[in-house]
């Protein structure tokens, strides 16, 4: 049985490549999705890679997947710092949660220092760019 991993991406991550490349790099989210696909080739793992600009949609996805996941990799983007709703929806799951950020929010503006996900995360990977997603997958390999 393949491990089911959900990779969730929050608001504005669909703009990667065009959005502040000096902070987030030049790769698009589609480039990141493809590298994740390449990385899992030949392994007993399947990934469902999603992005939404809507908090409620992310919450609904997490609800729908309750009891059906072996791992969650989440870059909740700005919702990291604001969303009790995503925090609560993540609590529906007892699988490992890996929090990923392309940049290191702790080294940026103060409003990015707090994370609603951190206390639920088995691991936080920040400041490693797109490679952070690969490292997060490695946790499950
Ligand atoms: C981010 C960091 C967040 O503070 C920011 O709101 C994002 C992206 C990152 O990947 O570095 O949108 O999660």
Image: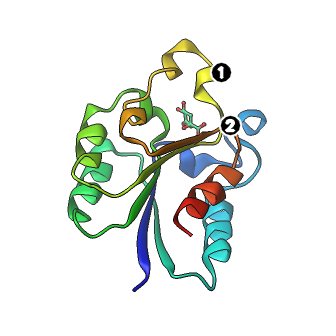
Residue at the far top: name it: 110
Which of 13/116 is in front? 116
Q: 10 Å neighbourhood of mark 2: few (<14), some, or many (≥20)?
A: some
Figure disc tally = 2
* In the image: residue 91, left or right of residue 35: left
Residue 113 lies, in percent from the top left, at 51, 20
Q: Secondary structure at mark 2?
A: loop
Specify the label residue 127 is tagged with: 2
Residue matched to label 1: 107
Assign ligand 1 to one image quadrant: top right
Which of 28/2 is in front? 2
Residue 105 lies, in percent from the top left, at 59, 27
Question: In the rendered image of this protein, does residue 57 appear above or below residue 34?
Answer: above
Cα separation between marks 2 and 1: 9 Å
Question: In the rendered image of this protein, does residue 79 appear above or below residue 107?
Answer: below
- Which quarter of the picture shows residue 102? top right
Q: Secondary structure at mark 1?
A: helix
Residue 133 lies, in percent from the top left, at 61, 55
Tag 2–tag 1 contact (CB < 8 Å): yes
* In the image: residue 116, left or right of residue 85: right
* In the image: residue 62, left or right of residue 78: left
Which of 120/33 is in front? 120
Q: 10 Å neighbourhood of mark 1: few (<14), some, or many (≥20)?
A: few
Which of 51/94 is in front? 94
In the rendered image, which quarter contains the C terminus? bottom right
Closer to the chain start, of discs 2 and 1, is: 1
Tell whether circle 2 marks a residue whose Cβ is less than 8 angstroms from ligand 1: yes
- Which quarter of the picture shows residue 19? top right
In the image, what residue occupies the spot 39% across and 86% down?
A: 1
In the image, what residue occupies the spot 58% across and 81% down?
A: 43
Specify the label residue 94 is tagged with: none
């Amino acid at each position: 049985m393949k491990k089911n991993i959900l990779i969730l991406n929050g608001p504005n991550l669909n703009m990667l490549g065009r959005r502040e490349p000096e902070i987030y790099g030049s790769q698009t989210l589609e480039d990141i999705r493809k590298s994740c696909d390449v990385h899992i080739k030949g392994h007993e793992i399947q990934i469902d890679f999603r992005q939404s600009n809507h908090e409620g949609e992310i919450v609904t996805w997490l609800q729908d997947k309750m009891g059906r996941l072996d791992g969650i990799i989440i870059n909740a983007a700005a919702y990291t710092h604001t969303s009790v709703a995503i925090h609560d929806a993540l609590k529906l799951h007892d699988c490992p949660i890996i929090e990923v950020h392309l940049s290191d929010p702790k080294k940026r503006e103060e409003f990015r220092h707090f994370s609603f996900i951190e206390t639920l995360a088995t691991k936080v990977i920040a400041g490693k760019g797109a490679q952070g997603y690969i490292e997060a997958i490695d946790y499950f390999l």
